[in-house]
Structures are given as C-alpha cells and as structure tokens.
C-alpha cells in the first residue's frame, strides 16, 4: 500500500467541488482510485510539470506525482486553466 497525501491546493479544490458538483466529484473519485491502484497509469507531463502525471476527468485534469512509494494529489482544474497555472 502506498502512502497517499494531498496538497493544500488540492484539498481546497475538493471541498469546493463536493459542494458544487457531485457528479464531477464522483468521476474524480473514480480516477483517484485508479491512480492509487496503478500509480503509473496517468500520462507523464513535461516542462514545468516534469515528474508529475495527469488523468483526465471529462474536460478537467487531475495532476499528481508518485515518488518513493508516496502518491500525492497536487491539483485539479479545467484543462485550459491548469497548464497556465504552472507556466
């Protein structure tokens, strides 16, 4: 079993999402479970997001990293916004 943590940014997003959109929250939960079972399932990212991976949830993106047995969920946002955050 891997150690699973969340960034502060991700915690804030989850709280807002659960209040706003239950169906998207449920879809996100499914993708998070996939990442927990198979950490290397997501597409590897490049440039400023190097060593991180992503999974799509509709038009949204879940960004996480897996390093030394620790899975850390970093951020979740719309595809158009998330990559601009990390430029």
Image (cartoon, helix red, strand yellow):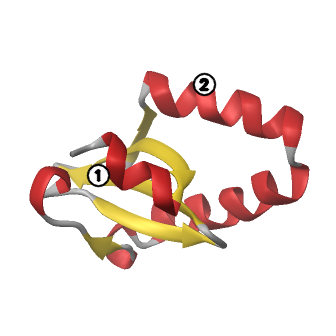
How packed mark 2 is, by other alpha carbons closer than 10 Å (few <14, some 14-19, many 20 or more), is: few
Q: Left or right: where does residue 35 sit relative to residue 12?
A: left
**Above or below 30: residue 78:** above
Mark 2 and mark 1: Cα distance apart in space = 18 Å
Residue 48 x %, y %: 14, 51
Asked whether disc 2 touches disc 1, contact meaning CB atoms under 8 Å apart, the reply is: no
Image quadrant holding the C terminus, namely: top left
Judging by the rendered image, the residue that carries numbered circle 1 is 65
How packed mark 1 is, by other alpha carbons closer than 10 Å (few <14, some 14-19, many 20 or more), is: many
Residue 34's quadrant in the figure? bottom right
Residue shown at 15% from the left, 65% from the top: 46
Residue shown at 75% from the left, 39% from the top: 17
Res 28 seen here = yes
Residue 33's quadrant in the figure? bottom right
Judging by the rendered image, the residue that carries numbered circle 2 is 12
**Above or below 69: residue 17:** above
Residue shown at 34% from the left, 48% from the top: 84
Residue 72 x %, y %: 37, 42
* Element assignment for label 2: helix
Which mark is first along the chain, 1 or 2? 2
Q: Nearer the viewer, residue 83 or 19?
A: 83
User: Residue 47 — which label?
Assistant: none
Image quadrant holding the N terminus, namely: bottom left
């Amino acid at each position: 079993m891997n150690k699973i943590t969340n960034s502060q940014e991700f915690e804030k997003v989850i709280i807002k999402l659960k209040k706003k959109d239950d169906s998207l929250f449920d879809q996100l939960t499914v993708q998070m479970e996939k990442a927990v079972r198979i950490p290397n399932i997501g597409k590897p990212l490049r440039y400023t997001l190097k060593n991180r991976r992503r999974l799509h949830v509709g038009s949204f993106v879940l960004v996480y990293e897996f390093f030394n047995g620790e899975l850390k969920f970093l951020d979740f946002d719309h595809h158009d916004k998330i990559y601009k955050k990390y430029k």
